[in-house]
Amino acid sequence: MMKSKWILTGVLTVITLLSIPAPYIAEAQDFVPAPVTISKDRVKYKGKTYFSHVVQESQTLYSIAKAYGVTVQEIRDANPDLTVLKKNAIILIPDKDAKGYVKPVEDPETVPDTGETPGTAAQEESQSYIEHIVKWNDTLSSLAEKYGVTEQEIVEFNKLESRTIRKRQVLKIPVKNASQPESIPQEIKTEQPQSPDITSPVETEENTDSLHQSLLDRISSWRSDQMQQILSPLMRENAHVGMSLLLPFNANEKVNENQIDFYAGVLMAVRDLSEGEKIGIDLHVFDASAGINGQSVPQETLAASDFILGPVSPGDLGKTLQLRPGDGIPVISPLDQKASGMVGSAIGLIQAPTSYDNQYRDLVSWLKDDYAVGDKILLISEQGGNPGDFGTKVTGALNRSGLPFREFDYTILQGRSITDRLAALLSTDRPNRIIIASEKEAFVNDVIRNLTVLTLKKYNITLYAPAKFRNFETIEVESFHSLHMHVSTAYHIDYDSEPVRKFLLEYRAFYQTEPSRFAFQGYDLACYMIRMVAQYGDYWKQMLPQCPETMLQMRMEFERSGDSFINKGTRRIVYDTDFRIRTVR
């Protein structure tokens, strides 16, 4: 079973989230009511059955009433003390189908299959109850303690044949003295208590206009001799996840802004998951630049974590693997692609950024998927030049692929006569698939110039390239589109996708700045890992290979390697000839 709550002690430099207010949207925008999800929790109170609905931001009484199939007045009658609809308030919604216990949902798949026979009407009228949907970490003992009843009362009330309960099973928890409002559990009848917002840029840092700047100022002012002990109990009724974040903030000198951006992304993920998905999260944050040892990162805190995110460098990752108590707590490598070399020998390391080698292999695999008999494949390299890591690896992968290809090499000094020599190797009526086995910008630029000339002569050319080509400043992006360039990369942000647009709006509103790729990376990793722990508990590591997912910036596609895991997920993008950049995956 997962831990439920932890205490943070003995931390030299700690940044910790207590609560983050919901981001605001500019007043000039039109108000759009938030969608309403039908609650899965019901309560029987004073002889009537109600849904207990948690109000979300921008929801209205009208939108809630419409979703549940009741009138606004019926909601007001059920909640006589309701004056203003506040976020996180719990309101009662009359269940019009209470006799048959049919929930008015739009998606039938959201109705849990209980596998049980409902109790008799006489029993249901004789005693009030709360419906509880069993979660993976629930037991009869924990439910009895939570609701103030005995295990035997739950067994008898639900006519259970055994004491084994299963995930998504619906149990009726008897409520004693239901005529008294206090008998309704506090968690479903009152607003969630609001913790003081110690990180708010308005309340805690004067003359700052963003939380981002507030974080920078706060960390810059800390020193290793200032003991920080801040506990952030973002606890909810569902799963609880403990997370330690180790990043080289360099708080004692010039603050590393890339790591601050990463941390800002993590904070956004914690806010979204705690508020939107009701996942309880304990977040402990350490400055890894102070050194990885038992004083700066105490073992008792790590022991209370389900996973450790960071640090960055292979050296610090190795120290953290040695420092953690036992081998059971995974250490996640968040940023360094080269740290993948540690996976074979490390125990419990999760390499998140996919390696360069894997990107090169995926590029050849992509070419193989696209290839059809009759297509021409040409590998172009610099005569007498150093092919670099990409040239060497992609040539090896192409040799192992079994694809028929021709090789062609030349030097830049040979001039424009190369165009005709290239044309002689290409097909005039079939696709021509090209790989440039070099990382030298000058040579790559020359090859692309020659290939672009051939596209003007109606040659059908597709260039398969590493992500590094996109950073070459001497190559015009129009050439990439002309060559229909295919890129396999570890990171790509599709700004046309709805999740990315949503993240951008909320990040801008909250931090008053643009998110960097480090912010996207922090958000992606925190979201994915926290959800895995919340959903699968102690078995989440074993489930990694079965749970591929494309996030905002990166793709998670883990593969076991010995006692560790390595991400093989890549993003594929295409520079279309209509000057759009299309995301393939």
Image: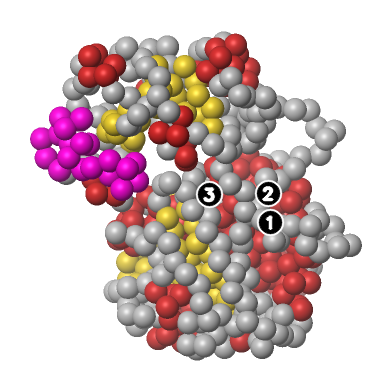
Q: Residue at x 67, y 45 (%)?
A: 22
Mark 3, residues whose alpha carbon is within 10 Å: few (<14), some, or many (≥20)? some
According to the picture, the residue beneath numbered tag 3 turns out to be 273
Place residue 361 in its image quadrant.
bottom left
Q: Secondary structure at mark 3?
A: helix
Residue 162 painted magenta: yes
What colour scheme governs how the chains and residues are painted in the rendered image of this protein? secondary structure
Q: What kind of residue is marked 2? A: Pro
Q: Is residue 276 above or below residue 89?
A: below
Q: Which residues are magenta?
A: 144-163
Circles 2 and 1: CB atoms closer than 8 Å? yes
Residue 370, image x, y percentages: 47, 49
Residue 369, image x, y percentages: 43, 51
- Can residue 268 be seen in this snapshot? no
Q: Nearer the viewer, mark 1 or mark 3?
A: 1
Q: Secondary structure at mark 1?
A: loop
Q: Residue at x 58, y 34 (%)?
A: 89
Q: CA distance from mark 3 to mark 2?
A: 13 Å
Q: Earlier in the sequence, mark 2 or mark 1?
A: 2
Place residue 498 in its image quadrant.
top right
The reply, left or right, for residue 260 in relation to residue 154 is right
Which label was assigned to residue 21?
A: 2
Q: Nearer the viewer, mark 3 or mark 2?
A: 2
Q: Is residue 35 above or below residue 519?
A: above
Q: Quadrant of the N terminus?
A: bottom left
Q: CA distance from mark 1 to mark 3?
A: 18 Å
Q: Earlier in the sequence, mark 3 or mark 2?
A: 2
Q: Is residue 408 above or below residue 10?
A: above
Q: What kind of residue is marked 3? A: Leu
According to the picture, the residue beneath numbered tag 1 turns out to be 197
Name the chief secondary structure element in magenta. Answer: helix
